[in-house]
Image: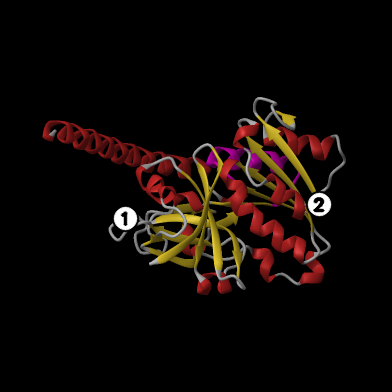
Amino acid sequence: MVEILSRELLAENIWQTKVYAPRIAKSAKPGQFIIVRSEERGERIPLTIADYNAEEGSITMVTQALGASTRKIVAKGAGESFSDVAGPLGRPSDFVAEDINELRKKRFVFVAGGVGTAPVYPQVKWLHEHGVEVDVIIGAKTKDMLIYTDKMRAVATNLYIATDDGSEGFHGLVTTLLETLITEKGKSYDCCVAIGPMIMMKFVTLTAKKFDLPCVVSLNALMVDGTGMCGACRVTIAGKTKFTCVDGPEFNAYDVDFDEAMRRQGMYRTQEQRAAAIAAERAAGHKCNIGLDK
């Protein structure tokens, strides 16, 4: 059992949960993820590590409650426990292994979409702690869906916000803002990292390509088993089959077959919708039975 230390609502249906997992906290590196089971027979849910504190022995995860299993995760609060949390899993971000002096010569831009802002944070934090300049673009539909802006502002060289409705920051898409920074603001970058919805990462990749800007994306959302056993997270990278959980979750964006990945993601979404419908029917039946008993 893994103790929950705190739970906090960040935005509508988006929760931050901190758990006591000292071994994971001691070993975790930027870019890695964990697998969470809320209960013994629960579904294995892959979540990127949003933060970790080796001294405190804690790791932080951010979960958007969209399906039956994620709703079970966010329903638990401080003092309760998850059945298990496994990790850290996956390969750390490539920059962790780079020569620090060479790394400090580079300028990064991170593009975060929605809940993807959470896994961007530990990467930017690590780079900041090692003296690397990083610009960050955070995108959301509206200002009420923005998360981690204050935390990100504390570690980013520059923070830019884009909202679809213009309620905060730049009025428009993150791709348009990225292009504006390069073409109109004179920004120059050595690497772009995009984490967020698959469609967003696809179009960030297309935008980066216009400027011959190296680009990395995280495909964490495709995972199921998380250990390479089930094969559900297979993706086509540079024409070859790779497994997101053991070969990733980060890949060279130009090598990713995004259209195939989105089709697979759509298949899992359909299965989740069926599970949610069954859960709703059971809940309705349970209420009905209670009424009859009375």
Q: Give the image quarter of residue 130.
A: bottom right
| Residue that protrudes farthest toward the top in the picture | 165
Residue 241 in view here = no
Marks 2 & 1, CB-CB < 8 Å contact:
no
Nearest to the eye among marks 2 and 1: give it.
1
| Residue that protrudes farthest toward the front in the picture | 294
Residue at image mark 1: 42
Q: CA distance from mark 2 to mark 1?
A: 41 Å
Label 2 packing within 10 angstroms: few (<14), some (14-19), many (20+) = some
Disc marking residue 157:
2
Total numbered labels placed on residues in the image: 2
Camera-nearest residue between 101 and 127:
127
Disc marking residue 107:
none
Residue 223 versus residue 10 in the image, above or below: below
Residue stretch in magenta: 195-214
Considering the image in quadrants, where does the C terminus appear? top left
Which residue is drawn at the image coordinates 84% and 44% (left, top)? 187
Q: Amino acid at mark 2?
A: Thr
Locate residue 41 relative to residue 119 in the image: left or right: left
Callout 2: helix, strand or loop?
A: loop
Which secondary structure is most common in the magenta stretch? helix
| Residue that protrudes farthest toward the left in the picture | 293
The stretch drawn in magenta includes residue 278: no
The image shows residue 76 at horizontal and vertical percentages of: 41, 52
The image shows residue 136 at horizontal and vertical percentages of: 73, 47
The image shows residue 131 at horizontal and vertical percentages of: 81, 64
